[in-house]
Amino acid sequence: MVGVVAALLTATTAVAYNSVVSTHTREYGPGNTENDKSEWLRSNGDDYREVVEELRPTEVPVPPGFSYTADVDAFIKWTTKEPALIQVTSVRSSYAYWAKCAWEREWLAAHAAGDGPRRAEATAILRDVPSWPLIVATASGSTVDHLRTVAQAADRGDGDPVRRDVENNCRPLPAEGSR
């Protein structure tokens, strides 16, 4: 009998060590003012990075040559310090804000280089940012107003509000790397 119990404990322990914790909880937010109805994700899931990367919205434009890699790395590091639950909408909206920052940096680079067509493209995108569904779904009215103000400044050719927004609201870039 002792041998059977030892074998059973060993098998149970092996299953526990080899089990996979999915990022997907199949639990959804209540849809109140703080949480939407999207799925809650486990930040300590074995497939968390893959799920975060799969949630990248294709409808959010990014500047040529832009990569989300550094943003995703920082997001993963921040959200996995301790096990937590995070909603799908929060992950997807993070991509929208990273893209907004990329377009602001693109605008600043084009402005500094005197590249009118590149700046015009960035300006057009910045005008659209306050109406992006992922921004509207997660931002307060004052945030949307602020994004409109930044876009209006870009439209006027005023780089100061754009630069301040990047400094205050965008993750710092590494010393070298993507724009």
Image (cartoon, grey):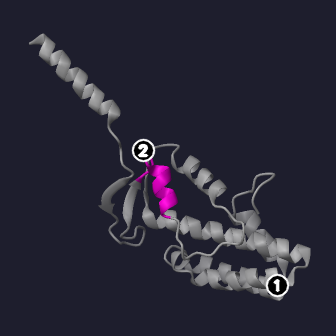
Q: Can residue 153 be seen in this view?
A: no
Tag 2: amino acid: Asp
Q: Where is residue 30 in the image (x, y as percent from the top left)?
A: 32, 68
Mark 1: amino acid: Pro
Q: Is residue 108 magenta?
A: no
Residue topped by disc 2: 46
Quarter of the rendering occupied by the C terminus: bottom right
Q: Mark 1 points at which residue?
A: 117
Please give the name of the residue rendered at 84% of the width and 71% of the height, measured from the top-left corner.
109
Residue density around tag 1, few if under 14, some if 14–19, many if 20 or more, within 10 Å: few
Q: Left or right of 31: which side holds 109?
A: right
Q: In this view, does 150 lie to the left or right of 8?
A: right
Q: Does the magenta stretch include residue 54?
A: yes
**Image quadrant for the N terminus?**
top left
At a point 84% along the width and 75% down the height, the residue shown is 110
Please tell me whether residue 155 is drawn above or below residue 103 in the rendered image.
below
Q: What stretch is highlighted in magenta?
A: 42-55
Work out whether residue 20 or residue 32 is closer to the camera in this orientation and state it: 20
| CA–CA distance in space, label 1 to label 2 | 44 Å
**Which element type, helix, strand or loop, lies under badge 2?**
loop
Picture coordinates of residue 61, whole percent (x, y): 62, 75
In the image, 121: left or right of 16?
A: right
The residue at the point 27 percent across, 32 percent down is 15
Q: Which of marks 1 and 2 is nearer the N terminus?
A: 2
Which of the labelled discs sits on residue 94, or is there none? none
